[in-house]
Amino acid sequence: MKHTLSIIVLALTIAFVGSGCSHRIGEFTIVSTKNYETKAQYKLVGRIEGSDKKMIILFFPLGTPTINNAVDDAIQNGGGVYLANAVIESSAWYFILLGQTGFTVTGDVYAAVDRGDLLNPNIEKFELKKTGDALTMVSTSNGNKIAVQDITDAVAN
């Protein structure tokens, strides 16, 4: 009985001392922190992840993570300008007096096409078009439209 009680107390202590959590902040059609050219065409680079995480020592954070920095990291990792189908998550973990908190962004990165891409019919290309008050990416091959939401608008709301 004493041995079982010791194991339960040890398990509860470990659960209290070391814990973490993560949650989804939101999903966005398209987000960007970069300047864009409305006359340029863009192509899909791939599904890329970026993050901005800061350590916490003795309950003091060593910086403040931001969604903007996580989006920038993902875009830079893919060499692009936009993230489409973006998912933004927040996470944190702590163990005794050490921890980490931050944001992770995963999305499809779009980059400006180069001359070789313009001649390749297998690469779907998009153009940015102003439609009313909004900006839309329009496929040059099939006319599909994707609305653009700037990350600063998403954070402000």
Image: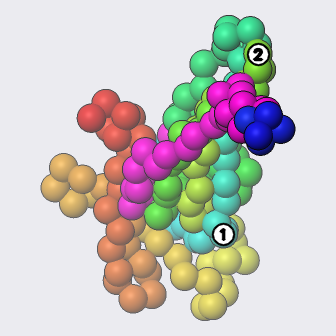
Name of the residue lying farthest toward the right: 3
Which residue is more in the foreground, 124 or 146?
146
Counting from the top left corner in percent of width and height, residue 132 is at: 16, 55
Type of amino acid at the residue the image marks with label 2? Leu
Report whether 132 appears left or right of 157: left
Quadrant showing the C terminus? top left
* Callout 2 secondary element: loop
Residue for badge 1: 46
Which residue occupies the foreground of this view, 3 or 72?
A: 3
Identity of the residue furthest to the left in this view: 132
Asked if residue 11 is among those painted magenta in the image, a careful observer would answer yes
Spot occupied by residue 12 in the image (x, y as percentages of width and height): 68, 33
Number of numbered discs visible in the structure rendering: 2
Of circles 2 and 1, the one toward us is: 2
* The magenta stretch spans residue 72: no
Mark 2 — residue?
A: 97
The image quadrant that residue 49 belongs to is bottom right
* The magenta segment: 6-33
At 35% from the left edge and 68% from the top edge, which residue is drawn?
146
| Cβ–Cβ under 8 Å for marks 2 and 1 | no
**Quadrant assignment for the N terminus:** top right
On screen, residue 63 above or below 113: above
Colour scheme of this structure image? rainbow
Q: Position of residue 33 (x, y in %)?
A: 51, 40
Identify which residue, 88 or 133, lies in the foreground. 88
- In which quadrant of the rendered view does residue 130 lie? bottom left
Mark on residue 63? Answer: none
Residue 93 appears in the figure = no
Residue ranking furthest to the front = 1
Label 2 to label 1: alpha-carbon separation: 38 Å
- Does 46 sit left or right of 133 as displayed? right
